[in-house]
Amino acid sequence: MFSQSDFTYMERALALASRGMYTTTPNPRVGCVLVKNGEVIGMGFTQPAGQDHAEVRALKDARSRGKDPRGATAYVTLEPCSHFGRTPPCAHALIDARVEKVIAAMEDPNPTVSGRGLAMLRDAGIDVRCGLLANEAHEMNIGFVSRMTRRRPWVRMKVAATLDGRTGLPSGESQWITGEDARADGHAWRARACAILTGIGTVREDDPQLTVRAVDTPRQPQRVLIDSRLDVPLDARILDGAPPWIFHSADADPARADALRDKGAELVELSNEHGKVDLPAMLTALADRGINELHVEAGHKLNGSLLREGCVDELLIYLAPSLLGNAPGMFDFGPPATLDARPHLKFHRIDRLGDDLRILARFAGTHGASETR
Ligand SMILES: NC(=O)c1ccc[n+]([C@@H]2O[C@H](COP(=O)([O-])OP(=O)(O)OC[C@H]3O[C@@H](n4cnc5c(N)ncnc54)[C@H](OP(=O)(O)O)[C@@H]3O)[C@@H](O)[C@H]2O)c1
């Protein structure tokens, strides 16, 4: 159904989409390539929210080069939108430009608009195909798909551990377990996330800044702290710079809350029946704030709570070739009553970074591209 050149142009559109990796949030990363008579006449990728989407950018690019998009084929990594949001619908722009054919990688995951953009194009007499390199397109926007279909971000939990799964010494000393390559790679994953989350234990022990430093990024992700009683020290580094969001329970002291607000922090109270933060509700709250991908870097206690409550989609584990013996592990939970009851994952990718291994594993039942297609 698709030709070799279709694959080549869609790969180009995907490469363009990846240029919006750090900037399109909360919108999806989308790329568009316009091809006419075997020549690429326009290219674009989605700009920061409120600015041009990929299709409009590609049409403007073609016109700026003196090329007429009439009769062209548009390769887009996501179904063109059909609704007026902060910008007019891209489907209109393609219809007005009188392109002849549109090839989309995947439908819009938003159930309220899915398929409408493609229908609008078909109704205008445009030849429309969908599904080319759909897996790759889904991976590119795994967080956006999650937010649209499940009203929660895609949750990626990062852990650096020794080969025996230990994350630090009982004294709290944990820096550094992995090598420089792995640590820089960890920052690249931080950078692509919309938000980075940690727990009060990690803030107490490590006083992390929770920012992206080892790679260039045009924007810092939102920082999020889980701190039931608002114990975070007022001089903690997470309170410096852009205001963090702190999720706490009803048990928190109102005077502490005032002091933290004075420091600029944004507080969100979400309690469960145990007087702790309601973690599933927190994911909904983050989705409602436009968080597509959430990167977790916490200690074994919060990691365990998140796992137990089904709040994790993917593990990003760095394994160093060393051992720590009877030291804290990655996740404080269980053990399950039977082997059958243990959580199951699938290895998604395994790579070597310097002396360390990087493992990306997904929980069975999460909506990763490989499970849905
Ligand atoms: N190697 C790595 O990849 C890595 C990454 C990060 C941190 N660490 C290490 O981990 C150590 C800290 O571990 P940790 O387990 O103490 O820190 P943590 O997991 O970051 O935070 C622990 C705190 O989270 C809170 N918590 C757990 N479940 C909760 C829930 N449902 N709602 C609200 N709060 C909840 C608890 O606070 P309350 O008791 O107040 O409820 C708990 O004390 C440090 O030594 C740090 O270096 C290692």
Image (cartoon, rainbow, N blue to C red):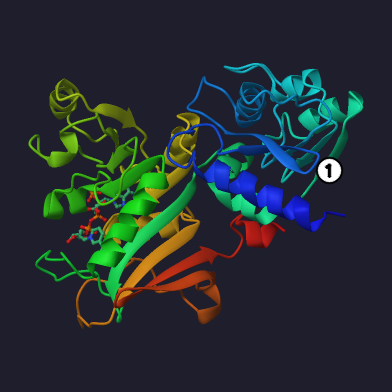
- Can you say whether 277 is above or below 56 in the image? below
* Residue 79 visible: yes
Quarter of the rendering containing residue 96: top right
In the image, is 191 to the left or to the right of 176?
Answer: right
- Can you say whether 234 is above or below 162 in the image? above
In the image, is 290 to the left or to the right of 119?
Answer: left
How far across and how far down the image is residue 139, in percent?
A: 58, 52
Q: Quadrant of the C terminus?
A: bottom right
How far across and how far down the image is residue 262, in percent?
A: 15, 21
Q: Quadrant of the N terminus?
A: bottom right
**What residue is pinned by disc 1?**
129
> Residue at the front extreme?
66
Element class at badge 1: strand
> Which residue is more in the foreground, 272 or 165?
165
* Residue 343 visible: no
In the image, is 108 to the left or to the right of 349?
Answer: right
Q: Residue at x 25, y 43 (%)?
A: 211
Pointer 1 residue Cβ closer than 8 Å to ligand 1: no
Name the amino acid, label 1: Arg
How far across and how far down the image is residue 46, in percent?
A: 55, 32
Q: Residue at x 81, y 25 (%)?
A: 70
How far across and how far down the image is residue 197, in percent?
A: 32, 46
